Amino acid sequence: HQTEAPDHFDAIVAADQKVEPRDWMPEAYRKTLIRQIAQHAHSEIIGMQPEGNWISRAPTLKRKAILLAKVQDEAGHGLYLYAAAETLGVDREELVEMLVDGRQKYSSIFNYPTLTWADIGAIGWLVDGAAIVNQVPLCRCSYGPYARAMIRICKEESFHQRQGYEILHTLSHGTPEQKAMAQDAVDRWWYPSLAMFGPPDGDSTHSERSMAWKIKRFSNDELRQRFVDMCVQQAGVLGLRLPDPDLRWNEERRAHDYTQPDYDELMRVIKGEGPCNRQRMAHRRRAHEDGAWVREAARAYAEKQHA
Ligand code: 3HC
């Protein structure tokens, strides 16, 4: 039914139904989904590094067990997303090569260092919190496999956000040094978390088409605003200050006015000039090389089975 295929595709999207792997789809739709899903998967895998650094340094066995579970979840999120990308006709080996040689990106946020244990709390509360604000709408994305992967991932993200919030709550109600450590982490992670939502709508190259195809359901700035409004009230309960003296409720807008993150810094970090880009990529390359023997063994085994 190649003839009426484009109308069929438009009708599915218009009716808020799901485009499935075997449905006809515009080549540009396929390409932008491969781009976004692959980079989302890369972000999950690279995101294991900053937190992984603290598994052996967690302050208690309970915190170690929780962090271990979270980092393992991130690996699983990466695998779901690579599997979703593969339904579009790419191979994950190819996608990992594109990450490792810089032809594909991962989220800017993971290029910042985790300097103290409180950073693990700030990452859970802010970074996973931002991820939830971004990923809940993606559960209604027009491409079936991506939307379904998001439903499972969002359930696990809420545990990630909760445990981070609880770490910060414990620290901010602990000794003065612990409260100062929690405040320092929030000060360092606040603006990079705002930048995670992407460039301002006016500078976003993909938003217009991505929203027309119902991949992106809300714009970068709409989700950023939603995140700010959510964090203000939670920071109050934590007893921690958000590092923005101009943050205030705007009755007219029914939303908080806030200071924008430094988008020049975001572009620099995306280009590879963030604090940790080099070590994140070196670590990823080394892990890929160290895993080559597993892939060769699996291939040899598959060929033997096949023969
Ligand atoms: N980091 C790196 N690159 C970014 C970025 C960021 N924070 N924000 C935007 N970009 C890139 C885009 O990828 C695009 O470059 P490309 O054409 O080479 O892909 C360019 O900047 C222009 O940005 P656009 O707004 O036009 O791009 P999108 O429409 O794709 O919007 C996005 C960007 C909102 C990140 C969107 O891609 C998206 O929603 N992706 C899925 C969510 C995701 O990737 N989250 C990663 C966060 S980490 C995570 O979820 C793990 C959790 O467990 C913490």
Image (cartoon, grey):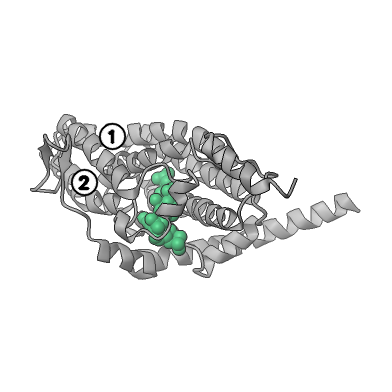
Residue at screen point 80% across, 53% down: 301
Mark on residue 165?
Answer: 1
Give the quarter of the image for residue 251.
Answer: top left
On the question of residue 42 being in view, the answer is yes
Give the quarter of the image for residue 217.
Answer: top left
Q: Position of residue 96 (x, y in %)?
A: 57, 60
Could you tell me which quadrant the N terminus lies in? top right
Of residues 78 and 27, the one nearer the viewer is 27
Drawn side of residue 53 relative to residue 238, left or right: right
Residue at screen point 25% across, 44% down: 118
Of residues 157 and 51, the one nearer the viewer is 157
Count the numbered circles shown.
Answer: 2
| Amino acid on which the number 2 mark rests in the picture | Val
Residue at screen point 46% across, 50% down: 210
| Amino acid on which the number 1 mark rests in the picture | Tyr
Circle 1: element type: helix
Q: CA distance from mark 1 to mark 2?
A: 11 Å
Asked if the residues shown at circle 1 and circle 2 are in contact, with their CB atoms under 8 angstroms apart, the answer is: no
Drawn side of residue 62 relative to residue 307, left or right: left
Residue at screen point 35% across, 47% down: 219
Q: Earlier in the sequence, mark 1 or mark 2?
A: 1
Mark on residue 36?
Answer: none
Drawn side of residue 223 relative to residue 2, left or right: left
Mark on residue 186?
Answer: 2
Circle 2: element type: helix
Q: Position of residue 117 (x, y in %)?
A: 28, 45
Q: Residue lying furthest left in this view? A: 245
Of residues 170 and 8, the one nearer the viewer is 8
Figure check: 144 above or below 221 = above
On the question of residue 48 being in view, the answer is no
